[in-house]
Amino acid sequence: MTKAVMIQGTGSNVGKSMLVAGLCRAAARRGLSVAPFKPQNMSNNAAVTSDGGEIGRAQALQALACGKPLVVDMNPVLLKPETDVGSQVVVQGKRLTTVKAREYSKLKPQLMELVLDSFNRLKSKCDLVIVEGAGSPAEVNLRQGDIANMGFAQAANVPVVLAGDIDRGGVIAQIVGTQAVISEDDAGLIAGFLVNKFRGDPSLFDDGYAMIEETTGWRGFGVLPYFDEAWKLPAEDALDIKNAAREGGLKVVCLGLSRIANFDDLDPLAHEPGVSLTMLRAGEPIPGDTDVVIIPGSKSTRGDLAFLKEQGWDVDLVAHVRRGGQVLGICGGYQMLGQWVRDPAGIEGPEGDTEGLGLLNVETVMTPDKRLTETAAVHVASGEVFRGYEIHIGRTEGTDRARPFARVDGREEGAVSVDGRVSGSYLHGMFCDDGFRRAWLKALGATIGDAGYDATVEAVLDRLADHVEEHLDVTEILAIAR
């Protein structure tokens, strides 16, 4: 019988995703057929699956750690925030609806059946499923109808390991306080705890660790020191992207949009020794010595276009191009580069038209159908063949499309300005391809590194598994699975 164990956290960003990835790789190296599962995720950084849907980027990394192809059952409910109060709801890989937070609470009960359907289907294909919670079970105001934490654990009868984050302080209160506020039934599902992100000598926390065990009656599975190479793995949260400032490198700046989406395009550039990568935050001007500006994807193109202009980045971009700088817009960023973004049906928000940046002679009309596919393309300028993926709504047309960025199955894709300084493309993931990334950087005068991106990620996942095995009682964590 396939078994399962769940990692829940005392809060958001305590390291659950990284813990599950490390445990997945550790279990796979022990010869187990293992798969990741997250009942509900909230992220605008999605991955395209082998079965034609989309899941959270964290589950894509965990699937890689397992050596498994991506399937929609690994993350059956994905919430993609479009505004401060509303999110697109993706169920088993496909968009279901867009709802406000209060409306979503009414939708959750009918989603539990689909979550359990995906979980059971995944279980039927492997030896072990390692489940990741979302947020914290201590958010008891959200317990009714919960499908992400204890609600799911109870419905699927999955034992839980609670992870606390000592790096943010108060880890004793995090863990003990969680037990204090959750119900007795939910507390009974927690088989033990672990402490994550410790810096310094772990023995200094021996007394605190013992106090948690004594107070809660839960067993401890170990104290995990901070994993210094975490930044080398694909980030799910834009705030986790590590600026890679390097003297003398090609200066690449990415605009930190308020609804930034699918920014995994940046991860491979951060690894390059000849690239100085900066994620620009709100209120910061584009530096005058920037070589390349990347406008990334967005979950709300017109909303982020307004946000971009509020920062004054539209003026900075014109000056940047006038100085001879390069601009690359990817997906939503490509749409923003045009003359207009039109949404006559109100698909992304209020219906209407928004004037674009005017750096490409194209315009975009939002359409209800989402293009969601893995893609093989040929980069026109270099002739390099590369793989990527498309995940977007909208159709872009205009005279600059006569100079395509790439060709996909014989059709022209993307657009390039007359002077060649501004490019736009719907293709995500292009920089993960070593050949394309090196050709693109070389054309811009950057020093090229030798390490392959995929090989680097695989090696870091192995070192993460080594780290987890050394400091946690992995054997006992796997033993409590049922």
Image: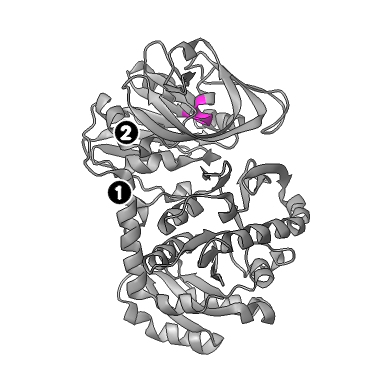
Q: Residue at horizontal 73%, vertical 47%? A: 100
> Do we see residue 227 in this rendering?
no
The disc, 1 or 2, on the residue closer to the chain's N-terminal end is: 2
- Is disc 2 surrounded by few (<14), some (14 to 19) or many (20+) residues within 10 Å? some
What residue did someone put label 2 on?
437
Quadrant (top left/top right/bottom left/bottom right) for the N terminus: bottom right
Furthest toward the bottom, the residue is 214
Question: Which color scheme did the rendering employ for the protein?
Answer: one colour
Q: Is residue 224 left or right of residue 178?
A: left
What are the residue bounds of the magenta stretch? Answer: 330-334
- Is disc 1 surrounded by few (<14), some (14 to 19) or many (20+) residues within 10 Å? few
Main secondary structure of the magenta stretch: helix
Which element carries disc 1, helix, strand or loop? helix
User: Is residue 260 rendered magenta in the image?
Assistant: no
Residue sitting nearer the eye, 478 or 320: 478
Residue sitting nearer the eye, 32 or 49: 32
Q: Which amino acid does label 2 sit on?
A: Arg
Which element carries disc 2, helix, strand or loop? helix
Across and down, in percent, residue 261 comes to 52, 40
What residue did someone put label 1 on?
455
Quadrant (top left/top right/bottom left/bottom right) for the C terminus: bottom right
Q: Residue at horizontal 64%, vertical 49%? A: 92
Q: What residue type is labelled 1?
A: Ala
Q: Quadrant of residue 147?
A: bottom right
* Image height of 286 relative to 218, above or below: above
The tag on residue 110 is none
Q: Residue at horizontal 56%, vertical 40%? A: 259
> Do we see residue 282 in this rendering?
yes
